[in-house]
Amino acid sequence: MEAKKTRAKGGGRKPLPIEDRAKNVSVRLTPAQYEKFLTLGGIAWLRHQIEIAEPTD
């Protein structure tokens, strides 16, 4: 029987700092809004829009 391969303890990727970790969020869109979102470029478009947006007070 072949021995099971195991990883060395602590041998994985180190965790990111809390401020750099991604968050999972949900957004509700109508089917028409979702199609437009995909047409605009989907998540890549959304991330770009967030990066170029100027925060307001």
Image (tube, rainbow, N blue to C red):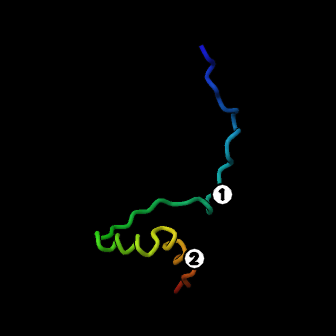
Mark 1 or mark 2, which is nearer the start of the sequence? Answer: 1
56 to the left or right of 33: right
SS at mark 2?
Answer: helix
* Most foreground residue, 34 or 10: 34
Left or right side of 31 for 6 = right
Q: Label 2 neighbourhood size at 10 Å, few (<14), some (14-19), many (20+)?
A: few
Secondary element type, mark 1: loop
Q: Nearer the viewer, mark 2 or mark 1?
A: 2
Task: Find residue 57 and name its label.
Answer: none
Q: Which residue is mark 1?
A: 17
Q: Amino acid at mark 2?
A: Glu
Residue 29 percent across, percent down from the top left: 32, 70
- The residue singled out by tag 2 in the image is 51
What residue sits 41% from the left and 73% below the top?
39
Q: Amino acid at mark 1?
A: Pro
Residue at left offset 49%, top offset 73%: 46
> With 51 as the anchor, is 43 left or right in this view?
left
For image coordinates 41% across by 70% down, the residue present is: 38
